């Protein structure tokens, strides 16, 4: 199964920063949206941030003003810059890239997940 490739997770102290990266696979010809989700232990997966093809962004209230989603179109990569991290940000973070394949089929590709742990 095709996956997006994530990197950048790890252990950070409260108040620290991390940047996650997610590279889209070559099977996606045209990207419509790029999204970051997270799932904490024992909780449902929730949408953290999203960016449309046109560049519009949306954030969960809990991360507004602390997290920033961005993209590098040339590399088909989406980033999540996370600042002022809190223990409650601890979760496995997943990217989701939606678009069209080269044969014009709708395609949604998840990343493998990367663990972010915020702890002193």
Image (tube, rainbow, N blue to C red):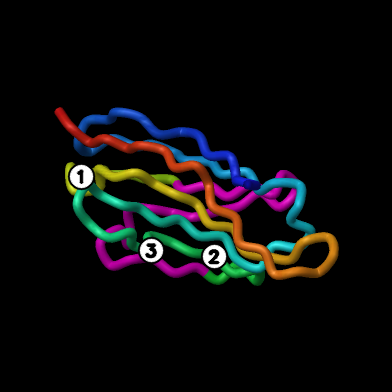
Q: Which residue in the structure is indicated by mark 1?
A: 86
Residue toward you, 1 or 26: 1
- Residue 101 in picture, x, y percent from top left: 77, 61
Res. 47 mark: 3
Q: Position of residue 26 (x, y in %)?
A: 76, 47
Q: Residue at x 42, y 38 (%)?
A: 114
Q: Secondary structure at mark 3?
A: strand
Residue 34 quadrant:
bottom right
First-in-chain label (2 vs 1): 2
User: Which residue is tagged 2?
Assistant: 51
Asked if residue 71 lies left or right of residue 17, the reply is right
Position of residue 7 measured from the top left corner of the image (x, y, whole percent): 50, 34
Position of 94 with respect to 63 (left or right) is right
**Secondary structure type for disc 1:** loop
**Which residue is more in the foreground, 35 or 100?**
100
Q: Is residue 58 magenta?
A: yes
Label 3 and label 2: CA atoms lie apart by 11 Å
Q: Is residue 30 above or below residue 12?
A: below
Q: Work out whether 92 lies above or below 50.
A: above
Q: Is residue 88 left or right of residue 18?
A: left
The vertical placement of 94 against 20, above or below, is below
Q: Which residues are magenta?
A: 57-80
């Amino acid at each position: 199964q095709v996956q997006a490739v994530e990197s950048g997770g790890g252990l950070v102290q409260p108040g620290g920063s991390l940047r996650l990266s997610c590279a889209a696979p070559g099977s996606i010809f045209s990207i419509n949206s790029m999204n970051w989700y997270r799932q904490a232990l024992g909780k449902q997966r929730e949408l953290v941030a999203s960016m449309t093809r046109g560049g519009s962004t949306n954030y969960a209230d809990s991360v507004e003003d602390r997290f920033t989603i961005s993209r590098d179109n040339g590399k088909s990569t989406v980033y999540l810059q996370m600042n002022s991290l809190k223990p409650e940000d601890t979760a496995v973070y997943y990217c989701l890239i939606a678009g069209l394949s080269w044969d014009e089929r709708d395609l949604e590709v998840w990343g493998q997940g990367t663990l972010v742990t915020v702890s002193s």
